[in-house]
Each structure stands twice: as structure tokens, then as C-alpha cells.
Amino acid sequence: MNYLAHSFLSFTDQQIVGQFLEDFIRNRDRFSFPKGIQDGITLHRAIDTFTDSHPAIHEAKKVFSPLVRLYAGAFVDVSMDYFVANDLSLHSLAEWKAHSLHVYQVLNTHHEWLPENFKRMLVKMEQDDWLYNYRENWGIKFSIQNVLNKAKYLDKDIPVYEAFLDHKDLLQQCYNDFFPDLLAHARGINALLQVEN
């Protein structure tokens, strides 16, 4: 899952912070954060583990693996944010906009906990409203290109976005089969975390 899904699958403001931080910190540093942020880190990892093992995600990876092989999972994660952002059973468009603005506000409020490389990314994320604009084809195209640009061993011109467009119906079905299971799993993990608090 990518940024929008991780933010949506957070149940407190501090969990939002932890969910975003997980990819930017070393494992040994996780215990230096407040418990609520640690819970977000734990939740992020549980979401990733569940996602990687789900049959619908294995099916979705087949769209990208002929082009990018082991990087297929990263492009599935980005693609799933498109379907989350367009899932009006979760939020209306106005609610998705409000969610995006709330996430930026939360992250800025917890500025002291953010590493410098994340702070730089957050400026761009907020300026271009990445979270809300994942619902647009151009928003996902931008995100896919971002992954290509960061990947050390991939040509920057691989037609990954075109594969996304060509297989959008299949990827939508994979999302439909997957996301309700993930949502239930995240709620279960959160309930366990609340018992510990």
C-alpha cells in the first residue's frame, strides 16, 4: 500500500505520523518515538505483511512483473492508491479532500519527529496535494514515474503507466477483492494495539 492507503488505515493522528515514518527510519530507531507513533509504525508493517501475502495482490503483480520483475509490488502499491482515492464507499470526494488536508496538518504539527528527507518530500506532497490527486490518472502517472526514477536498476522509460491503463479493470477487481480484507485486518491490529495501551 502507498501513502493514501496507509493514512486512511490509521486510527489516530499519531498513527498517521508513524505510518508515514516507517519507510524513512531505521528499525532500531522506532522505539525513540512516542507510543502512539510506534503504533503507527507497527500498523504500517502489519499492513505491508498482509498485503504481500494476499492472493489478489499476487494477481495484480502479474500486470507489472513482465516489465519490472521484482519491482512489481511497488507499482501495485501505487496503483492501489488510485482505487482507494476513487472508492466513494469509503469517503465522498469532499471527505477525501478533507482527509488529505488533515493528514498534511497532522504531519506538520508533528514536525519535530520527521527526518529531514521526509520534511522535504512533505513540502512537495502538500503543494501538489498528492493524497487527493491519486484519484486522477495524471496523479498516478506522476507517482509511477517517481518510482521509476528512484529505482536503481530500471529504465526510466518502461511503459508501466501504459500497463496500468491497459489493465485498469483487472487491477480494479484485485482492489475489490483485497481492500475489504485489508481494512478488517487493520481494524483488528488497531484493536490489539489499544489493548496494549
Image (cartoon, rainbow, N blue to C red):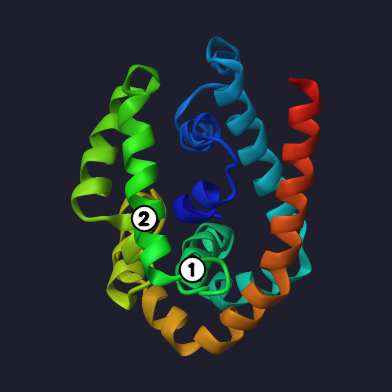
Which of 196/147 is in front? 196
Q: Which residue corresponds to mark 1?
A: 79
* Spatial CA span between label 1 and label 2: 21 Å
Q: Vertical placement of 25 versus 125: above or below?
A: above
Q: In the picture provided, is 196 more to the left or to the right than 48?
A: right
Q: In the picture provided, is 180 more to the left or to the right than 146?
A: right
The image quadrant of residue 41 is top right
Q: Position of residue 61 (x, y in %)?
A: 62, 70
Instruction: Specify the quadrant that holds the N terminus.
Output: bottom right
Q: In the picture provided, is 189 more to the left or to the right than 39?
A: right
Kindly identify the amino acid type of the residue bearing the numbered disc 2.
Ala
Q: Position of residue 112 (x, y in %)?
A: 34, 17
Q: Vertical placement of 26 versus 52: above or below?
A: above
**How many other residues sit within 10 Å of disc 2, few (<14), some (14-19) or many (≥20)?**
few
Kindly identify the amino acid type of the residue bearing the numbered disc 1.
Ser
Q: Position of residue 175 (x, y in %)?
A: 63, 73
Q: Vertical placement of 73 versus 87: above or below?
A: above
Q: Which residue corresponds to mark 2?
A: 98
Q: Position of residue 64 (x, y in %)?
A: 53, 73
Q: Which mark is residue 182?
A: none
Q: Which residue is painted at 59% across and 23% down in the image?
A: 36
- Number of on-image labels: 2
Residue 175 in view in this figure = yes
